[in-house]
C-alpha cells in the first residue's frame, strides 16, 4: 500500500446520522497532520452485513459503485467505520483478484455507466494515522500529552479479522495501541480485546446484542481501565449509548466512558471539544478528562 | 571404482540405525551431525511408546556403538557444504565448525563449565534450563566432549585455564574436509511448528502453556527439573492438565495441512505417564480425530480411558486465556459430542505442535540437488515403490525428513535399516 | 423428524460465499470461540454446519437460526480447514431471504437503502446541526443509480415483497 496525503473521504451512514462529533474531529485533526480529505459526492451505503445478508450481487455492486467513484476521483479511500472498511476492502480485494466476478459486477455497473477498474486502495483511519502520518509525527503534534489516563482500546472486529485478508496490511492491535500511547494515554492490555462489541446485532436481535456488549463491558471493567477508546462508530454507539441500555437491563454499573481515538488526539494537540461534542458522549467524559475538554 | 563408504547426514535415531547397519557390513561411515552431539530428538524424550522404555536407555547404547565402531567416524558440529559426482563416487565437502575444544583430549569432566561465567538458555532442554557458554549438550552426549558457543562466549579464558587436559583451544579454526563416498543418506529429522504463530494460544506469553517437547524435558529424569513435573510459573505440581492436539497440523492457514501422525500417540503416552507419576492430577486431551492406528495403539487408548481416567474431549479450542493472578489457563470449548459449550480452568496446557521440516532442509536439498515437496520434506523418487530414495540417484533419506509417513521411533529405525539396505544394494551393484 | 434435503449442502456450496461448507471437519473450533454461542445454546456455528451437511433445510431456512451471527469473523480466523463458517452464514442468509425469511430490522435497512441510498438516515436535528457547522449536506444524489442497481440484481423485488 502506498503512502498518500490525500484521500477520498468515505463517511458511511452512521456517522452523519448519529456521530457528527466524530466527523468534526476528523476534519479538524487530519489537515493538521498533513492529510487532505475530499468528500465523495453521491456515495452510497457501503452495504454492511445486514445488506450482505440479503443479496450477494447487490453487495458487490453497491460497494463497487463507491470504489468507482473513488477511481474517478483518482484517490484512495479512507473510511472511519470498520463495517464500511471491511465491506469496501473485501469487495475491492475480491474484484481485483477475480476476473470472472469482476466481469459479472461490471455488467451490473454498466447499467449506471460505471466500470470497476481496480485502481484504488481502501484504507481505514488507523491505517492512515499509523502508516501515512506515523507515530513520531503524531507525537510531535501533541502539545500537551494526556497523562494519567488508563484505557482499554477497542480496535473492533473488522479492523483485525479475518486475518487472511488483513495480514498483508497494517493490522493488529499494536498499531492502535501505539497511536494511543503517542498521545500520552496508557493503553492497558486486556484479555478480550478481539471480542466483538455486539453492534452488528443492533436492531436485529437487541437482546443478544445487549448480552454481547455486556460481556465486552465486563471484560473491560475487569481490566480496571478508566475509559474505552474506539475507532469504529458502531463500537462507539454500542458501548456508549449501548452501555446505558445494558446498564438498565442488567442493573449493573460499568462506569466506562467511551471516546474516539481521534478525539483524544484532538485534545492532545491542544484543541478543545465544544459543549455539544462533550455531550455527545452518553457516558460522561467530564470526569476523566476534566480540564482538558 | 566404487567408494565403499557412506555419508550419513543427521545423527538422530534413523541415521544412527543406518550407520550401524552399514558399518557392520564393513562399510566406512561418515556420520555428520550439525549439533555438538549425535542422538537427535530421541535423546530429548522421556519414555517411548509402546514399550514405555526410557528413551535414552534404548538410544545411548546405539550412540556408544557409533562412537566405538571402527567403521564409524563421527563428524559432529559439522555441516555438508557441497557435493560432486555420481552414485558410487561422490565427493562431499564438509565444514567442521570449530568447537574450540580438542575432542581427542577432552575427558568430559565438566570443570570448564563449572567455572564459565556465562549462562544462556539450553536448547536441548527447549530453553527451560540453562547451560554455560562452554557446555556438554546433555549428560550422555556422544562424543563426550564440551563445545564452546562462540556467539555467547566472552573469551575470558577461564575454561582454558581450568582444563586439566589442555583440551580448550580458543583459536581453533573452521576446517573443510573432503570425503569420498559411494552413497549418501539424509536423516536430518524435524523441527516443531512455532505455536506463537497462533497468538490466541498464548504460547510465549503465558508461562504455563508449553509444547509437548518442553513437557518431555520436564518429565525426563535428566531434565531441568530432575523429572519433577512442575508448573513453569510457580513450581507447583499441576493438578489439571490439558493437551491440545493439531496446533498447526491440519491447518490451511499455515500451509501445514498434513497430519503430523505421531501427536495423538505421544499425547496419550504422556497422559498415561503423568497419571502414573501423579495420580492426583487429571489429564484431558482435546482432539479433532484420535488417530490411533496399529501397534496396539487403540488398545492403549482404551486403557488410557478405562484404567487411567484420561479424559478425551472431541473439540479443538481456539483460544486460551490466562488469569493474570494465578496464571491458570481457561479454555472455552464446545464438547462436539455433547453439543455443549463449556469452559474449564487448567494449571498447565500442553500444545502438540505440527512437526515441520528443519529450517535448513531446503538448503541442504539444494546442495544435494534433491527435490523437496511443497512442505519442504525430502521427496521420494516414487512414493509407492521407492519410498526411501530421494530424487537423486545414490542419495537416500530416512526418518521424519521424509515427511510424516508414520514417523514414530520404530518406523524411523525401520527406515534407517531400509536405506542401509538400499545403499548396500547400490554400492555392491555399481 | 422432518425429511432431510440431501441436496442442501450442495445448494449452500453453490451459493456465493458458501463453498466452505464442503471443507468442514466438525472440529468445533468455531463454536469454541463464538461469542454468541457462549451466551445462548440457540446458536452454535458447528452445529449449524452439521445441520447443513445433514440436509436439515427445513430446520434452518425458515427459522431464526441464520440470524444470530455477529459477523465478528472470529470463527473465520480460526477455522483450520477453510470451512469459513462466517462466510457460509452469509450464503445461508441469502438463501433464507429468498425463502421469505428476513428479520424486520434487516428489512427496514434494505428499504431505507432503496429509498435513500443509506441504511440509516439523520433526523432533522442532526441535519440542522450539519448545516450550522457548515458541513456538506446529506443528499440522495446517487439514488437513481442505486435503484437501477438494485432493480438489476433483483433486490428491489425482495424489498418490495416485504
Image (cartoon, rainbow, N blue to C red):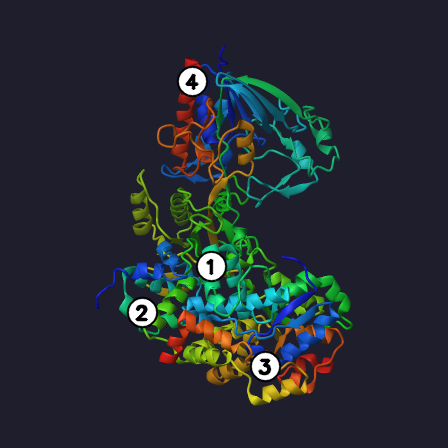
Cβ atoms under marks 3 and 4 closer than 8 Å:
no
Viewer-closest of B105 and A251: A251
Q: Position of residue B148 (x, y in %)?
A: 66, 33
Residue receiving disc 1: A103
Q: Chain of mark 2?
A: C
Q: Chain of mark 1?
A: A
User: Which dot marks residue B426?
Assistant: 4
Which mark is nearer the camera, 2 or 3? 3
**Gap in Å between the C-alphas at discs 2 and 3?**
40 Å
Going from N to C along the chain, the mark reached first, 2 or 3, is: 2
Residue receiving disc 3: C138
For the residues beneath circles 2 and 4, the answer to whether they share a chain is no
Helix, strand or loop at label 2? It is: helix
**Gap in Å between the C-alphas at discs 2 and 4?**
64 Å
Q: Is residue B105 left or right of residue B139?
A: right
Cβ atoms under marks 2 and 1 closer than 8 Å:
no
Which mark is nearer the camera, 2 or 1? 1
**Gap in Å between the C-alphas at discs 4 and 1?**
58 Å
Residue A57 occupies which quadrant of the picture?
bottom left
**Gap in Å between the C-alphas at discs 1 and 3?**
32 Å
For the residues beneath circles 1 and 3, the answer to whether they share a chain is no
Residue receiving disc 2: C60
Q: Residues within 10 Å of mark 1 (few under 14, many from 20)?
A: some
B285 shown above or below C97? above
B283 shown above or below B64? below
Q: Quadrant of the C terminus of chain C?
A: bottom left
Viewer-closest of C98 and C12: C98
Amino acid at each position: 500500500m502506498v503512502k498518500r496525503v490525500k484521500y477520498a473521504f468515505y463517511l458511511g451512514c452512521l456517522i452523519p446520522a448519529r456521530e457528527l462529533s466524530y466527523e468534526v474531529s476528523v476534519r479538524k485533526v487530519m489537515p493538521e497532520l498533513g492529510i487532505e480529505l475530499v468528500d465523495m459526492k453521491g456515495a452510497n451505503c457501503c452495504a454492511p452485513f445486514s445488506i450482505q445478508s440479503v443479496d450477494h450481487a447487490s453487495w458487490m455492486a453497491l460497494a463497487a459503485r463507491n470504489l468507482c467513484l473513488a477511481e474517478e476521483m483518482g484517490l484512495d479511500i479512507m473510511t472511519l467505520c470498520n463495517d464500511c472498511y471491511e465491506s469496501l476492502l473485501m469487495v475491492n480485494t475480491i474484484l481485483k483478484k477475480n476476473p470472472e466476478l469482476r466481469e459479472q459486477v461490471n455488467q451490473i455497473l454498466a447499467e449506471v455507466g460505471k466500470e470497476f477498474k481496480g485502481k484504488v486502495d481502501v484504507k481505514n483511519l488507523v491505517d492512515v494515522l499509523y502508516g501515512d502520518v506515523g507515530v513520531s509525527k503524531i507525537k510531535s503534534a501533541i502539545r500537551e500529552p494526556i497523562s494519567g489516563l488508563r484505557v482499554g482500546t477497542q480496535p473492533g472486529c473488522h479492523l483485525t479479522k479475518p486475518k487472511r485478508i488483513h495480514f498483508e496490511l497494517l493490522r493488529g492491535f499494536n498499531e492502535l495501541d501505539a497511536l494511543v500511547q503517542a498521545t500520552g494515554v496508557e493503553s492497558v492490555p486486556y484479555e478480550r480485546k478481539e471480542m466483538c462489541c455486539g453492534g452488528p446485532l443492533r436492531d436485529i436481535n437487541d437482546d443478544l446484542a445487549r448480552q454481547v456488549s455486556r460481556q465486552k463491558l465486563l471484560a473491560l471493567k475487569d481490566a480496571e481501565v478508566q475509559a474505552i477508546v474506539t475507532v469504529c462508530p458502531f463500537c462507539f454507539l454500542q458501548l456508549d449509548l449501548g452501555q446505558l441500555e445494558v446498564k438498565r437491563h442488567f442493573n449493573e454499573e460499568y462506569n466506562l466512558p467511551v471516546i474516539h481515538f481521534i478525539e483524544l488526539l484532538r485534545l492532545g494537540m491542544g484543541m478543545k471539544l465544544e459543549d455539544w461534542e462533550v455531550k455527545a458522549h452518553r457516558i460522561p467524559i467530564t470526569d476523566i478528562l476534566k480540564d482538558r475538554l | 571404482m566404487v567408494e565403499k563408504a557412506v555419508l550419513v547426514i543427521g545423527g538422530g535415531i534413523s541415521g544412527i540405525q543406518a550407520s550401524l547397519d552399514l558399518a557392520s557390513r564393513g562399510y566406512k561411515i561418515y556420520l555428520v551431525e550439525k549439533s555438538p552431539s549425535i542422538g537427535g530428538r530421541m535423546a530429548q524424550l522421556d519414555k517411548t511408546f509402546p514399550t514405555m522404555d526410557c528413551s535414552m536407555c534404548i538410544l545411548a547404547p546405539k550412540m556408544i556403538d557409533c562412537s566405538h565402531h571402527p567403521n564409524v567416524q563421527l563428524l559432529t558440529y559439522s555441516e555438508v557444504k557441497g557435493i560432486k559426482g555420481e552414485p558410487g563416487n561422490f565427493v562431499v565437502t564438509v565444514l567442521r565448525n570449530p568447537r574450540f575444544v580438542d575432542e581427542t583430549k577432552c575427558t568430559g569432566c565438566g570443570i570448564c563449565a563449572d567455572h564459565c561465567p556465562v549462562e544462556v538458555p539450553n536448547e536441548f532442554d527447549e530453553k527451560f534450563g540453562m547451560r554455560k557458554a562452554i557446555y556438554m549438550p546433555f549428560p550422555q552426549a556422544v562424543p563426550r566432549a564440551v563445545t564452546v558457543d562462540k556467539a555467547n562466549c566472552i573469551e575470558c579464558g577461564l575454561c582454558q585455564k581450568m582444563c586439566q587436559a589442555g583440551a580448550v583451544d580458543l583459536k581453533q579454526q573452521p576446517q573443510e574436509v573432503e570425503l569420498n563416498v559411494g552413497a549418501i543418506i539424509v536423516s536430518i529429522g524435524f523441527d516443531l511448528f512455532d505455536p506463537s504463530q497462533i497468538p490466541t494460544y498464548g504460547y510465549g506469553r503465558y508461562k504455563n502453556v508449553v509444547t509437548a517437547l518442553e513437557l518431555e524435558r520436564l518429565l525426563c529424569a535428566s531434565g531441568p527439573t530432575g523429572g519433577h513435573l512442575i508448573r513453569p510459573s510457580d513450581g507447583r505440581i499441576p493438578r489439571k492438565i490439558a493437551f491440545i492436539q493439531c496446533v498447526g497440523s491440519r491447518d490451511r492457514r499455515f500451509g501445514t495441512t498434513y497430519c503430523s501422525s505421531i501427536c495423538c500417540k505421544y499425547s496419550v503416552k504422556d497422559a498415561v505417564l503423568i497419571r502414573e507419576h501423579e495420580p492426583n492430577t487429571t489429564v484431558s486431551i482435546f482432539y479433532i480425530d484420535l488417530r490411533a492406528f496399529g501397534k496396539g495403539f487403540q488398545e492403549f487408548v482404551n486403557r488410557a480411558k478405562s484404567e487411567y481416567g484420561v479424559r478425551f474431549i472431541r473439540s479443538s479450542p481456539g483460544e486460551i486465556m490466562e488469569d493474570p493472578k494465578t496464571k491458570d489457563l481457561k479454555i472455552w470449548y464446545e464438547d462436539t459430542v455433547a453439543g455443549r459449550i463449556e469452559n474449564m480452568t487448567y494449571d498447565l496446557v500442553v500444545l502438540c505442535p505440527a512437526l515441520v521440516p528443519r529450517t535448513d532442509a531446503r538448503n541442504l536439498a539444494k546442495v544435494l540437488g534433491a527435490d523437496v515437496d511443497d512442505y519442504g520434506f525430502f521427496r521420494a523418487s516414487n512414493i509407492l515403490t521407492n519410498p526411501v530414495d530421494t530424487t537423486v540417484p545414490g542419495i537416500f533419506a530416512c526418518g521424519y525428513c521424509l515427511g510424516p509417513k508414520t514417523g514414530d521411533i520404530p518406523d524411523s529405525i525401520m527406515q534407517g535399516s531400509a536405506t542401509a539396505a538400499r545403499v548396500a544394494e547400490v554400492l555392491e551393484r555399481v | 423428524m422432518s425429511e432431510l434435503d440431501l441436496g442442501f449442502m450442495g445448494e449452500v456450496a453453490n451459493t456465493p460465499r458458501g463453498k466452505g461448507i464442503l471443507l468442514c471437519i466438525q472440529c468445533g473450533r468455531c463454536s469454541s470461540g463464538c461469542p454468541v454461542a457462549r451466551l445462548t445454546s440457540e446458536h452454535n456455528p458447528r452445529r449449524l454446519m452439521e445441520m447443513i451437511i445433514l440436509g436439515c433445510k427445513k430446520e434452518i431456512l425458515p427459522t431464526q437460526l441464520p440470524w444470530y451471527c455477529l459477523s465478528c469473523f472470529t470463527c473465520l480466523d480460526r477455522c483450520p480447514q477453510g470451512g469459513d463458517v462466517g462466510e457460509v452464514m452469509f450464503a445461508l442468509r441469502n438463501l433464507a431471504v429468498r425463502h421469505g425469511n428476513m428479520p424486520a430490522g434487516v428489512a427496514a435497512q434494505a428499504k431505507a437503502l432503496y429509498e435513500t441510498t443509506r441504511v440509516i438516515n439523520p433526523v432533522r436535528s442532526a441535519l440542522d446541526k450539519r448545516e450550522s457547522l457548515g458541513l456538506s449536506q446529506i443528499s440522495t444524489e446517487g439514488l437513481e443509480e442505486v435503484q437501477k442497481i438494485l432493480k438489476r440484481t433483483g433486490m428491489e423485488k425482495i424489498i418490495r415483497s416485504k
